[in-house]
Image (cartoon, helix red, strand yellow):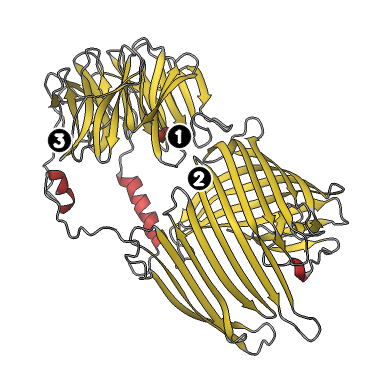
């Protein structure tokens, strides 16, 4: 619309919704057991009345919580493991499925998705003591989702997924043997099953109309229970004849009851927005997760029809017309366009990025004339992405030469290792750089490991006052980094442990210098902040860096800024002046907070840093920034206090303390941008206060 901005249109739309939409409230029969169980959770109910949730909140880390029938908490434990050799990694509720209790309520079973050493998907069955929360035993190698434990506690029935085919399997808990219960073929999708006392199994199955319920009889036959388009899902047995499940009604998921012997679904809830993970609490009530604004509550309701006249649910929606996308699912034979084998060179020489460019900048030596730059960027890959490459060439009018020429290539054929090669030539006024590196890396579980062979050569051209000079650096490098932690959306990392190690050996270094090494270790710990505050944390970091046999002063400590900043400082300037012979095109440096403007020279350093951070959540944005720019979102303001200490060459101390203020924003839903101010007070080296104002990505 002319004369209207996106923001004003969105505001009018919001106001219209507030005027026209019905404000929904809980019915009187729906009671709250726990008002907030996080913004996502999974739920199971025990025959003895206990209720189990795996829940995560914006201010709470993931917990396994078991409540009594009245909603009081029996226990609530964090699921995160921190030390190497941990039994599992992922703990968020979205990776949990198939929560179910044994008939006596003593154990809780579930299936947790996780990653293996190759970063592939795997699942494992957990057996949890429902009295203490201890994970008693796990069964590995499950490929699928939960699941329901049999009432006698002898087996666990889960959904086994192989390719695009899902089937029900039975895991014998005593022996670990797995027995297929269904033998569907082709494309099939199944949801979490539920096992009755007599061995019958009810489960959701994807059909032409959508998710519907089916019953697996004890003799192996499968019978459809629903055949409509109302999203019938998550069934649980109420008794020997009835099941309760979630089903769409007027655009909302509601709890329904169905007699498996025959009849139609009967709606028993009228939740304001949706019902999830509905489960029976005895024969007269159900419990479920109720959507309450941006979070879930734990509610219960009686097993009675919402309206006596509504014995039959909505009429089945008409079957959608077949589409090309669903044709293979309907048994249509695929049309084979080509059956040629894959070739590593297919589309390899057809760059996906072809970008010539040209621009001009003022000449720093003569402001009256510009310097013209022109170049070409090419990038491509083969059809399956196993081989990738990039080429960049740039020339400028001042040097009258190709100032930048670089080529990089990477391949996944060495999987699980990812291997890359890069070579480059850079020309600047007075010097030329030749650089090459061969690297390979992979991740074990969530721990990255990398190896690199680095080769650098820099030539300084001869001038009227100084002769030409060549410096080189050649050697292998290796690094590994481990981290385990738990975090919240609003509070950041609440508890965590990190350890990283790095090493490099350079047998050819600076031509005239002796070979040297570079050894580095870093340990990080996160702990919760002040009592009663949920949106803060404390980070403690210790770093040790040592360059044995290196030239004196090669290691730079400080003098590195995090972002682009304007500074107001007190005290002398840094005396660091590294000879050209020790500048082959890379630097050996460590960041020291509070010393962003002052570089120290050393051969070794020990660093200890502490940072306290508190977040003020804003979560507000505009669809258009200043009417014509992309959307703009302000997420939070962060208040920080920090202290840092460094000891160089085991003799000199360098201390600083201060605070910072960050404004975290996002442009266009894609570009994070932070505005910050930092103040630091330095206690050594004759330095005074430091003020930084800047921008960081």
Q: What element carries label 1?
A: loop
Residue indicated by mark 2: 443
* x, y percent for residue 145: 33, 31
* x, y percent for residue 287: 34, 21
Q: Residue 92 carries which label?
A: 1
| Whole-number angstrom distance, CA of label 2 to CA of label 3 | 45 Å
Closer-to-camera residue (446/564): 446
Which badge, 2 or 3, is on the more N-terminal residue? 3
In the rendered view, does 503 fall on the left or right side of 407?
A: right
Q: Residue at x 16, y 56 (%)?
A: 336
| Whole-number angstrom distance, CA of label 1 to CA of label 3 | 32 Å
Of discs 1 and 3, which sits in the foreground? 1
Q: Residue 228 carries which label?
A: 3
Q: Is mark 2 on a helix, strand or loop?
A: strand
Closer-to-camera residue (543/49): 543
Question: From the viewer's perspective, is residue 89 above or below residue 194?
Answer: below
Res. 201 visible in picture: yes
Q: What element carries label 3?
A: loop
Closer-to-camera residue (510/363): 510
In the rendered view, does 648 fall on the left or right side of 626?
A: right
* x, y percent for residue 596: 74, 58
């Amino acid at each position: 619309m002319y004369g209207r901005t996106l923001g004003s249109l969105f505001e009018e739309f919001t106001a219209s919704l507030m005027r026209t939409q019905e404000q929904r409230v809980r019915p009187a029969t729906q009671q709250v057991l726990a008002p907030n169980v996080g913004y996502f959770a999974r739920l199971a109910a025990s025959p003895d009345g206990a209720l189990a949730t795996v829940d995560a909140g914006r201010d709470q880390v993931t917990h396994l919580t078991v409540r009594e029938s009245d909603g009081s908490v029996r226990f609530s434990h964090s699921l995160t493991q921190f030390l190497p050799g941990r039994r599992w990694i992922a703990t968020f509720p979205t990776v949990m499925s198939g929560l179910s209790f044994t008939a006596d309520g003593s154990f809780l079973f579930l299936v947790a998705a996780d990653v293996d050493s190759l970063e592939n998907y795997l699942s494992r069955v957990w057996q949890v003591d429902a009295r203490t929360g201890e994970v008693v035993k796990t069964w590995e190698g499950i490929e699928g989702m939960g699941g329901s434990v049999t009432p006698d506690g002898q087996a666990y029935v889960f959904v086994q997924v192989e390719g695009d085919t899902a089937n029900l399997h039975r895991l014998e808990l005593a022996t670990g043997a797995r027995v297929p219960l269904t033998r569907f073929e082709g494309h099939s999708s199944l949801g979490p099953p539920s096992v009755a006392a007599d061995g019958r199994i009810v489960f959701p199955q994807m059909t032409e109309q959508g998710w519907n319920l089916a019953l697996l009889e004890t003799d192996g036959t499968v019978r459809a229970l629903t055949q409509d388009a109302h999203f019938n899902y998550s069934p649980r047995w109420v008794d020997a004849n009835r099941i309760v499940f979630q089903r769409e009604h007027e655009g909302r998921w509601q709890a329904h009851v169905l007699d498996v012997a025959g009849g139609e679904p009967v709606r028993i809830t009228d939740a304001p927005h949706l019902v999830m993970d509905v489960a029976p609490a005895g024969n007269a009530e159900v419990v479920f997760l109720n959507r309450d604004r941006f979070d879930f509550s734990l509610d219960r309701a009686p097993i009675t029809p919402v309206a006596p006249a509504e014995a039959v649910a909505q009429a089945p929606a008409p079957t959608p017309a077949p589409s090309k996308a669903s044709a293979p699912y309907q048994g249509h034979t695929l049309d084979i366009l080509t059956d040629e084998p894959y070739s590593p060179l297919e589309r390899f020489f057809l760059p996906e990025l072809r970008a010539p460019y040209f621009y001009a900048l003022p000449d720093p030596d003569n402001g009256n004339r510009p310097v013209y730059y022109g170049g070409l960027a090419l990038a491509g890959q083969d059809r399956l992405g196993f081989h990738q490459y990039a080429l960049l060439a740039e020339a400028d009018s001042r040097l009258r030469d190709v100032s930048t020429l670089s080529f990089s290539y990477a391949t996944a054929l060495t999987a699980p290792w990812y291997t890359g090669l890069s070579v480059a030539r850079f020309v600047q006024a007075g010097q030329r750089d030749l650089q090459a590196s061969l690297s390979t890396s992979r991740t074990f579980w969530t721990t990255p490991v990398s190896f690199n062979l680095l080769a650098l050569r820099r030539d300084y051209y001869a001038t009227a006052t100084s002769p030409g000079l060549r410096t080189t650096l050649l050697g292998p490098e290796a690094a590994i980094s481990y981290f385990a932690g738990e975090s919240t959306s609003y509070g950041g990392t609440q508890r965590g442990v990190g350890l990283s190690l790095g090493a490099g050996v350079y047998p050819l270094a600076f031509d005239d210098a002796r070979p040297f090494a570079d050894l580095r270790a870093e340990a990080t710990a996160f702990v919760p902040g002040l009592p009663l505050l949920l949106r803060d944390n404390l980070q403690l970091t210790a770093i040790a860096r040592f360059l044995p046999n290196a030239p004196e002063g090669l290691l730079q400590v400080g003098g590195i800024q995090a972002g682009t900043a304007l500074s107001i400082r007190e005290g002398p300037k840094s005396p660091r002046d590294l000879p050209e012979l020790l500048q082959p095109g890379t630097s050996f440096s460590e960041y020291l907070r509070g010393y962003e403007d002052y570089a120290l020279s050393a051969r070794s350093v020990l660093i200890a840093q502490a940072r306290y951070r508190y977040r003020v959540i804003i979560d507000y944005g505009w669809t258009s920034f200043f009417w014509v720019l992309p959307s703009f979102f302000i997420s939070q303001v962060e208040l920080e206090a920090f202290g840092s200490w460094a000891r160089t060459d085991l003799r000199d101390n360098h201390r600083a303390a201060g605070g910072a203020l960050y404004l975290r924003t996002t442009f266009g839903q894609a570009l994070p941008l932070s505005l910050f101010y930092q103040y630091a007070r330095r206690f050594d080296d004759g330095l005074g206060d430091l003020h930084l104002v800047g921008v960081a990505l």
